[in-house]
Amino acid sequence: MSAHLQPTGSAYFIAKETELAETHTLSVLVDNEPGVLARVIGLFSGRGYNIESLTVSETEHEAHLSRITIVTRGTPHVLDQIKNQLERLVPVHRVVDLTVRAASLGHDRPIERELALVKVQGSGEHRVEALRLADAFRASVIDANIEHFVFEITGKPSKIEQFIAIMKPLGLIEVCRTGIAAMNRGPQGM
Amino acid sequence: MSGTENQMTGAEIVLQALKDNGVEHIFGYPGGAVLPIYDEIFQQEEIEHILVRHEQGAGHMAEGYARSTGKVGVMLVTSGPGATNAVTPLQDALMDSIPLVCISGQVPTALIGSDAFQECDTVGITRPCTKHNWLVKDVNDLARIIHEAFRVAQSGRPGPVVVDIPKDIQFATGTYTPPSAVPTQKSYQPKTQGDLKKIEEAVELMKGARQPIIYSGGGVINSGPQASHLLRELVELTGFPITSTLMGLGAYPASGKNWLGMLGMHGTYEANMAMHDCDVMVCIGARFDDRITGRLNAFSPNSKKIHIDIDPSSINKNVRVDVPILGDVGTVLEDMVRLWRAASKSADKARLSDWWETIAKWRARNSLAYTPNDEVIMPQYAIQRLYELSKDRDTYITTEVGQHQMWAAQFFGFEQPNRWMTSGGLGTMGYGFPAAIGVQVAHPKSLVIDIAGDASIQMCIQEMSCAVQYGLPVKIFILNNQYMGMVRQWQQLLHGNRLSHSYTEAMPDFVKLAEAYGGVGIRCDKPSELDEAIRQMIDTPQPVIFDCRVANLANCFPMIPSGKAHNEMLLPDEATDEAVANAIDAKGRQLV
């Protein structure tokens, strides 16, 4: 579009992208029917879009509706395309770009939270330090014996990143993250 | 509604649902996983089944049938290879927005996932090449799903859908629900009415235009005959020049005085120049495809662009537009024509006179000119003669893909919509012949001609057997130059004239081939004998293969070489060997 195009010597024109990529969080309301997640992620891989985080669960059991939260990265033009392509899928009810909505509401960004389970093994000083830091991050211990802890932590992705980073030298064994759940601030729904 | 009268087997439900959706013909090929449905077909007479020779043929036949009637085309295939062979026509229909319902058999539910005989993940494989697809797991859902499949296929932007039915579901007994009793899926409710404010804005822009152009596409054809009628009315009212994409030919008549011919890579000089220099562009049911736009950053640089499309993802995809109007072409045009008429003082046509003068100069360039030849048949001449000798008849044209397709688009004049069936988006060699069979099934008394190339025709030639079996007098008109002409043309342009594998050294004798299948073969290699041979072809009441031997090395011009803009076309009289070799610079050539 605004990209500078060069002759490629092929049957196609290949564009050099000049717009800057942005990270946006999308909420997608879908019928919870077989294959719906495959349709969504197939669309992303088939059209060369990025998925940085993906969370999905049925949110309205009686109506069989699931809410998919996708964090994606692309130029504004590609982000528009992603939204339009998603809306074209038959079981998709609605797509909201939470990042755009947040900006229109005067917010910096939507509320984004993630949950992680973090297993740390150690003894002595390391063990004490891990527990002390977990407390500072408001992570709770959900399993432990004399050699390990499993912490549960929720928060912004950046907080979780930070927690994992400081657990690394203290005996980090494994991490499991849910991906981002998100919605906008204020009284309105999506 | 309850009781036993609505209890049927799955196979019975399939046939009942097809009848209730107005289906009269289906194209298919039997196999293990669809035998219960074939057993039902055998026991009824309302729906006629056409036995194809390859599932790809079934799909293209259903496409030709759909495109020429405006109805949904239906194909029936078995599991595994039946379904995978259907993939090419499904993707073809997706790209050209053709309504298609493909019913496929599947291994019994209990065997799914066990790598059973002739099993494949049909819904997985066809997910990206359909508008939507379903795997039926409960016989009581079957009727609803088939009705919904027809609704999805033909509403909004039309497209192909697949209903995959395991064999045990075909045998099981369940309740049949008629279409009227089925609730539609709430998440899919396409919007057809355009935003009136946007349409007013568009009309305002159009009234002020001094160098306008209408660029119409396949969406006008898909919207139905009324849309073509309204398009003609709009052109008449506004006095604007009009060009069209490959898919939109026939919506506005080629004999119309405002017609500039097709645009794009092999479009006319006047159409492409007018697109480049216009101040207001009205894009109606077209999608700014890369074959149309040429170099994007030089595409119509000084125009305000209005875009009418039913698919929101088509708007602002390749080209940023100023006035997007989301809706069905027919509905939007109705509003647009009404608003134009209502405008107290519609802009006078005199303000366009300078523009029309400029266009007349471009027209005078005669960009479709070619050098006539008394010794060998020029391919362009062959199309012109075919047109002249068939234009007073009830004629439908299909094509394969390549040079012959572009020549057909350039030299055959289409006066009506739904008369021109070609594979535009996917560019499927092998499309034209089965598509022609589908058209002939829908219009048994009409003259149906597949304009073919010698390479393309061999990709679905087996359907000769189908045409002969059903007495479908389809005419295959092969422009035989012994080359994959378009491949060769690109090799000449881009690859130093190294003609790697684009020459067919062993060509079948097409006359004998036609006879072997039980059809009629005609060969012609002299311009002086061409008319008589074409007449003979038209008068033959059987399927005909016409082997028209044309100049081997003719190329398709005008052409926008890659990396060039609309106003940098290569015209036929400039296309010397040297110009062709240098049309794309060395830097470009290395980049492929």
Image (cartoon, coloured by chain):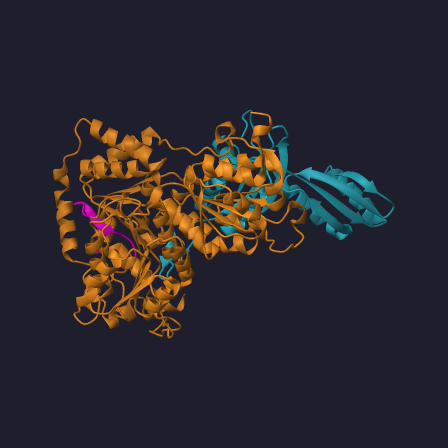
**Residue at x 30%, y 69% (from the top left corner):** B481
Task: Answer with the quarter of the image where residue B457 lies.
Answer: bottom left
- The stretch in magenta equals B255-269
Residue B268 within the segment the image draws in magenta: yes
| In the foreground, B521 or A39 | B521
The prevailing secondary structure element of the residues shown in magenta is: loop
Q: Position of residue A175 (x, y in %)?
A: 72, 48
Vertically, is A25 above or below B269?
Answer: above
Q: Nearer the viewer, residue A14 or B118?
A: B118
Q: Looking at the image, which residue is at 46% across and 37% down?
A: B19
Quadrant of the rendering where the N terminus of chain B is positioned: top right
Shown in orange, the chain is: B
Place of residue B321 in the rendered image (x, y in percent of width and height, measured from the top left): 34, 42
* Magenta stretch encompasses residue A12: no
Is residue B165 visible to us here?
A: yes
- Residue B351 x/y as whole percent: 14, 39
Q: Colour of chain A?
A: cyan
Q: Nearer the viewer, residue B67 or B219?
A: B67
The residue nearer to you, when weighing A51 against B63, is B63
Q: Is residue A90 visible?
A: no
Q: How many marks?
A: 0
